[in-house]
Amino acid sequence: MPKLSVVVPVYNVSKYLPKCLNTLTNQSFKDIEIILVNDASPDPEDDSICTFFSKKDDRIKYITHQENRGLGGARNTGIKAATSEYVGFVDSDDWVELDMFEKLYKAIRKKDADISQCYFMEHKGGLSNVRKLKRFRKKRDILNATNVLFWNKLFRKELFTKNNIFFPEKHSLEDLATMPRLLYHVESMAHVKEPLYHYIVTRLGALTANYNRIFADHSVVFNIIKEYMKHQQVWDRDRPYFEKRVLKSLLHDVKRFAQDDLFTEKEKNKVLNLHLHKSLTFLEKPEEIVIESIDLTEQSLRNYKWKLGVKSLLKVV
């Protein structure tokens, strides 16, 4: 049985897939299982590339979906097919350093942690920057104890299987819907202070460009988290931290949308007015958020987040 499994969803990525798979098949850590999940991709080259690599390397398991289930559905298929104690995820338009999984595996084993994570390189518009991440600290505010990224980490597989936590299917923001639920079961996380993952921020067809879908899906994923908290009987206790998670996520996407010069101010305001009201219902006082323009929306979200932080501090004192 391999020591770790890496799940790679595949959909319309033939231009990028060979580079991704070459960095995985040439990992310095050899005791690895690579699970390719073709999510009913309409690009026949995706199938050709996956078939070629799976025939060349017997560590590759190639699975095809008859119907598209989205990134979350492809990851779920990979988790259930994984035979290792640990599982990681790589997006097929990205690539990794050749020693990434060796270092993540050593870190998670040394600390006997539930998750290990590394820094990453962000590539955008011809520029590359190292993105450093804060250490995980087990605390009362578990919902915000770490970032919601999945592709720069290695997980103990039973976090998913034992707790019956999987990604939502056919929705964007699957990371946001899943990480807060997992964190209720995480005791420790190992930290590798090196940028071992290469993340491509923008490309035609990438989720980062689909703002309408992203803002529509916010309310869906917030509800998934809320219902899980109620099931765990922590909703009343942890609601302020949930609101903080909601605000952080909305602010992140509103700020990114505001900085995107591919859209006019009128188009941006139209998207927010169409979708944001539903997400704001997850806040205790949604009427405090102004949705007249994207700049005013961003500022009122910041003000609300600041007030929530002061309220939490006074509660602790």
Image: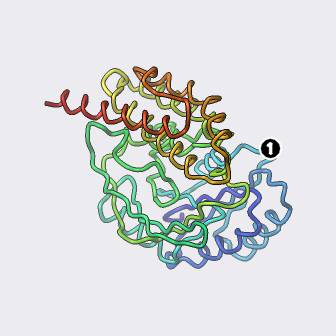
For residue 262, side relative to residue 124 (left or right): right
Q: What's the residue at 62%, 36% (across, down)?
A: 269
Q: Classify 119 as above or below 115.
A: below
In this figure, what is the number of numbered marks? 1
Between residues 282 and 21, which one lies in front from this camera angle? 282
For residue 202, side relative to residue 41 (left or right): left
Q: Quadrant of the C terminus?
A: top left
- Asked which colour scheme the image uses, the reply is rainbow
x and y percentages locating residue 258 in the rendered image: 55, 47
Between residues 296 and 114, which one lies in front from this camera angle? 296
x and y percentages locating residue 197 in the rendered image: 51, 68
Dot 1 alpha-carbon crowd within 10 angstroms: few under 14, some 14 to 19, many 20 or more = few
x and y percentages locating residue 95 in the rendered image: 59, 70
Q: What's the residue at 52%, 77% (across, down)?
A: 98
Looking at the image, which residue sits at the far left? 317
Q: What's the residue at 42%, 50% (across, down)?
A: 147
Q: Classify 270 as above or below 33.
A: above
For residue 72, side relative to residue 183 (left or right): right
Q: Secondary structure at mark 1?
A: loop
x and y percentages locating residue 111 in the rendered image: 29, 61
For residue 56, side relative to residue 24 (left or right): right
Q: Which residue lies under the disc numbered 1?
A: 67
The image quadrant that residue 305 belongs to is: top left
Between residues 312 and 93, which one lies in front from this camera angle? 312
Query: Which residue type does callout 1 highlight?
Result: Glu
The image quadrant that residue 303 belongs to is: top left
Q: What's the residue at 53%, 30% (across, down)?
A: 224
Q: Classify 208 as above or below 117.
A: above
Q: Quadrant of the N terminus?
A: bottom right
